[in-house]
Image: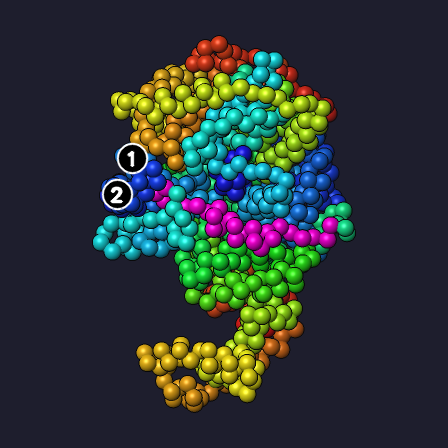
């Protein structure tokens, strides 16, 4: 079930590639160590071992079902360099890897159309739990007809993506509105590491669009206003290919210290002209287009203006290595979930991998569980509740604020106060604003009173999802009084392993509008003890 | 980089349709304020956010990747997110930017069309999944030429937005035509060395009376495609593979017609339709040719009456192919293998683009211009 046609899903935008130690001179342990180090020692090492050791098999499976991975001169998978990786281990399809994988997976759905039912353009409004606290399905709205239905299921797997729209600007699509994160939160599942929000180092100053890390993987440089490759100062070994949190912070420091470029010095130059033109055309086609169409720049001839921009949330619905949440029958995989393999900072080209590995494991585990159980029975109480909720939204007087206004204020507030650099005062201010917006959202009005494709109603529900995610993000970020991975607090600038090498969980309280309850879980360490992180 | 232009007013005229109202579609105008390089989609979202949340449009990524926002802007199909307001203003008739739903597909509401009923049904028609040799699947990846994967990347770049389907002229005449998007998808497998059913796929779409020979080379899909997939070029690649590599003689006479076309140009340099018709059916003396000629008489008469053809041109051959045409034919036909050129190699789909000159050293032995001959 998907609220958009599946090929519109945001995995389509994952450009650069997918990591796997497939090369004969690579080892999955090296991949695992890079991921642990990238996570700033907040990732769970057992989960990282699962992901990295299963990665080669997963990539081969994708190749077998049709993904057109680019080849090297001997006809084997070609691999490109990526941030935070000690060797080249990123398999790719030009710079449309996510699109290629998503479309091939959809091909498989079309292949199995007789045995797999698809519910396209259905919007989930609630998860259903029975009296024992087991997930038994969901309620959803058929967008095209407005009809609401109860879907009864032995297992539900959330694969609904991240929360990028909580920030403005973001590289994320309009559909990334924290739906699954909030749906799970509302039925009592803890959200883990919600403070860990990745700012991608290369987003267009112009409009926040993503420029793939593949550009730096292919050799592009970053320059400040003095034409200096400033990464020398911050990461002398890996330079532009340090992990994303490190590069974004370096850029932000350059900008804050007055060495930015552009009209107000608000950006940094990304110079792709150093990559041979034929290679750019073959392997970075999409950003040639983006440069031309959205920034008016020919990236093969001149540098492009970029800056850090909100891109990914490492946190999400807390799961184990089989994707299982604390609620029996409820699974989560991909950006919606937090296993945690990314910890404080995700490495580029590990997100497609995370999604695929834990998506498959969730499916396999859920299938096994299904075999031993009878189909549950649901009444229509949640359906009736959600129908009433929608009727209330449609029936509102036009006296409140517009949804678009509330969403804008939320986005800019989060981008001001929960970005690359954070400090307590700003986050407290953000918390206050989020609380006010929650109240305003209750009376926000809509124009569309119809049933067919009423996107206004969906917008109102999505706003509620986003506010839940924002609330948890702010609470967790205030709680973590140290700097680790993507969370850098100017008031607590050091990493503090003794007190904070642990996950922060946020759980809903009896009053859904109040701050979530905070609890902790240990970080699983198998073979890599925390050490100072240098690139 | 060019200096930013300040925001200015743009008026959007949006085609609205509310299926629940029982009323006919109507036009709705909104004035929005944005920088001229912002997209038509951003304009629509501003109108939706500020003035009327009921405007229906599918959209998600805003960056021409997800393929949701296919519409017509001033009559031209494309993505709303991929059309600048300034560019749209230039093509508008009266200073107002007109946004309508795509064509060839039923409208559900406002700018939202039923893609399942048309687009996805046609995609499903071409067996859109890889048919690898499942019994001999390698443990690791298939070993395939580097260039083959670059070649199919162009059709893989399709985002299924439906812009090409919207304005396909052949589909307007024959709604059963498989169409540009699905045929481009077909090339993605036919061009993929891992697929084991290439000949069967080609035979299937050659034999289908609504298949690959129903394309009339109108170029509309190439103009419409926001991703440079150039569906018509993919259809031509399918035909070259069908005739050149698999010698598929189809009951739509596509094989013979293509051969006749090449022969005609080789001989005349320009197209002589009189010869083309006869040669497509085995020459002037072949009874099939006479039969088709007889059937075509009404069309021929109309063409003569309207001055589209003259008796002199139809019966005589006033033009002979210049030497250069013969030289090009010789050069291409003597190549050991046929190579396809695409935007992942040259930066453009045009054979004679400036970048094409720089490309050969990058592609090694496989470099070369696309040949039009089989």
Q: Is residue A38 magenta?
A: no
- Give the residues in magenta: B109-134
Identify the chain of the residue marked 1, using the numbered disc in the image.
B
Residue shown at 33% from the left, 55% from the top = B75
Residue shown at 68% from the left, 26% from the top = A370
Task: Give the side of residue A251 with respect to residue B92, left or right.
Answer: right
Q: Is residue B115 magenta?
A: yes
Write down the residue under mark 2.
Answer: B28
* Near-viewer residue (B73 or A411): B73
Percent from the top left, x then y, of residue B213? 52, 67
Query: Which picture quadrant has residue A530?
Result: top right
Q: Secondary structure at mark 1?
A: loop
Badge 2: how crowded within 10 Å, few (<14), some, or many (20+)?
Answer: some
Write down the residue under mark 1.
Answer: B52
Identify the chain of the residue marked 2, using the numbered disc in the image.
B
Residue with the most extreme left position? B94
Percent from the top left, x then y, of residue A212? 52, 43
Badge 1: how crowded within 10 Å, few (<14), some, or many (20+)?
Answer: some
Task: Give the side of residue A348 with respect to residue A516, left or right.
Answer: right
* Near-viewer residue (A407 or A193): A407
Q: Secondary structure at mark 2?
A: strand
Percent from the top left, x then y, of residue A450? 35, 32
């Amino acid at each position: 079930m998907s609220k958009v046609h599946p090929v519109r899903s945001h995995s389509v935008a994952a450009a650069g590639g997918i990591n796997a130690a497939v090369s004969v001179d690579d080892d999955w342990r090296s991949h695992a160590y890079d991921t642990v180090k990238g996570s700033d020692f907040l990732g769970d090492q057992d989960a990282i071992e699962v992901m990295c050791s299963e990665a080669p098999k997963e990539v081969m499976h994708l190749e077998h079902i049709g993904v057109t991975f680019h080849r090297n001169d001997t006809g084997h998978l070609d691999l490109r360099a990526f941030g935070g990786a000690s060797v080249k281990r990123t398999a790719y399809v030009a710079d449309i890897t996510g699109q290629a994988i998503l479309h091939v997976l959809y091909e498989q759905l079309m292949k199995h159309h007789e045995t797999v039912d698809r519910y396209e353009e259905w919007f989930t409004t609630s998860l259903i739990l029975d009296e024992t606290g087991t997930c038994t399905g969901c309620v959803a709205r058929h967008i095209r007809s407005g009809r609401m239905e109860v879907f009864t299921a032995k297992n539900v797997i959330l694969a609904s993506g991240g929360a990028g729209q909580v920030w403005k600007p973001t590289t994320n699509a309009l559909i990334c509105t924290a739906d699954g994160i909030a749906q799970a939160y509302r039925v009592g599942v803890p959200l883990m590491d919600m403070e860990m929000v990745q700012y991608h180092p290369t987003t267009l100053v112009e409009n926040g669009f993503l420029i793939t890390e593949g550009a730096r993987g292919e050799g592009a440089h970053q320059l400040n206003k003095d034409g200096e490759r400033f990464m020398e100062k911050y990461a002398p070994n890996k330079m532009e290919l340090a992990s994303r949190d490190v590069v974004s912070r370096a850029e932000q420091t350059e900008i804050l210290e007055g060495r930015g470029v552009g009209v107000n010095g608000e950006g940094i130059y990304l110079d792709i002209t150093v990559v041979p033109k034929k290679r750019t055309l073959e392997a970075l086609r999409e950003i040639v287009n983006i440069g031309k169409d959205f920034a008016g720049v020919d990236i093969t001839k001149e540098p492009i203006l970029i800056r850090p921009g909100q891109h990914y949330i490492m946190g999400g619905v807390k799961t184990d290595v089989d994707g299982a949440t604390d609620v029996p029958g409820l699974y989560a995989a991909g950006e919606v979930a937090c296993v945690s393999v990314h910890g404080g900072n995700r490495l580029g080209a590990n997100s497609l991998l995370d999604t695929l590995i834990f998506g498959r494991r969730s499916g396999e585990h859920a299938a096994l569980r299904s075999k031993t159980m009878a189909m549950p029975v649901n009444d229509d109480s949640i359906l009736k509740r959600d129908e009433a909720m929608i009727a209330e939204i449609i029936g509102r007087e036009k006296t409140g604020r517009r949804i678009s206004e509330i969403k804008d204020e939320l986005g800019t507030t989060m981008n001001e106060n929960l970005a690359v650099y954070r400090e307590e005062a700003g986050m407290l201010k953000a918390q206050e604003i989020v609380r006010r917006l929650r109240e305003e959202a209750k009376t926000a009005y809509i124009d569309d009173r119809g049933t067919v494709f009423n996107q206004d109603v969906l917008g109102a529900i999505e706003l509620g999802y986003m506010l839940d995610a924002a609330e948890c993000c702010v609470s967790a970020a205030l709680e973590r009084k140290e700097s680790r991975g993507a969370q850098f607090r100017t008031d607590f600038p050091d990493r503090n392993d003794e007190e904070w090498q642990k996950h922060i969980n946020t759980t809903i309280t009896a009053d859904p509008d109040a701050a979530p309850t905070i609890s902790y879980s240990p970080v699983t360490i198998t073979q890599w003890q925390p050490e100072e992180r240098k690139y | 980089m060019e200096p930013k232009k300040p925001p200015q007013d743009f008026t959007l005229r949006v085609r609205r349709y509310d299926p629940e109202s029982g009323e006919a579609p109507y036009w709705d105008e909104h004035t929005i304020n944005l920088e001229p390089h912002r997209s038509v989609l951003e304009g629509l979202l501003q109108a939706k956010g500020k003035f009327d949340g009921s405007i229906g449009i599918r959209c998600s990524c805003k960056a021409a990747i997800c393929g949701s926002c296919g519409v017509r802007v001033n009559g031209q199909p494309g993505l709303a997110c991929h059309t600048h307001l300034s560019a749209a203003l230039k093509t508008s008739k009266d200073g107002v930017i007109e946004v309508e739903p795509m064509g060839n597909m039923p409208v559900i509401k406002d700018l939202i069309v039923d893609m399942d009923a048309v687009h996805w049904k046609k995609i499903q028609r071409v067996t859109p999944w890889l048919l690898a040799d499942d019994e001999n699947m390698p443990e690791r990846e298939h070993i395939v030429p580097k260039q083959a994967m670059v070649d199919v990347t162009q059709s893989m770049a399709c985002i299924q937005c439906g812009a090409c389907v919207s304005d396909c002229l052949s589909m307007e005449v024959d709604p059963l035509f498989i169409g540009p998007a699905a045929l481009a998808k077909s090339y993605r497998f036919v061009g993929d060395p891992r697929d084991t059913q290439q000949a069967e796929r080609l035979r299937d779409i050659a034999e289908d009376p609504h298949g690959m020979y129903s394309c009339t080379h109108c170029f509309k899909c190439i103009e419409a495609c926001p991703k440079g997939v150039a569906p018509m070029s993919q259809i031509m690649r399918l035909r070259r593979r069908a005739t050149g590599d698999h010698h598929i003689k189809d009951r739509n006479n596509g094989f013979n017609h293509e051969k006749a076309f090449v022969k005609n140009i080789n001989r005349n340099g320009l197209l002589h339709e009189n010869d083309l018709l006869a040669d497509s059916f085995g020459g002037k003396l072949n009874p099939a040719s006479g039969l088709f000629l007889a059937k075509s008489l009404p069309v021929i008469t109309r063409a003569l009456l309207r001055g589209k053809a003259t008796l002199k041109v139809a019966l005589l051959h006033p033009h002979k192919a210049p030497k250069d045409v013969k030289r090009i034919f010789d050069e291409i036909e003597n190549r050991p293998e046929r190579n396809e050129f695409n935007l992942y190699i040259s930066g453009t789909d045009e054979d004679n683009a400036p970048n094409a000159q720089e490309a050969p050293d990058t592609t090694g032995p496989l470099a070369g211009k696309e040949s039009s001959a089989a």
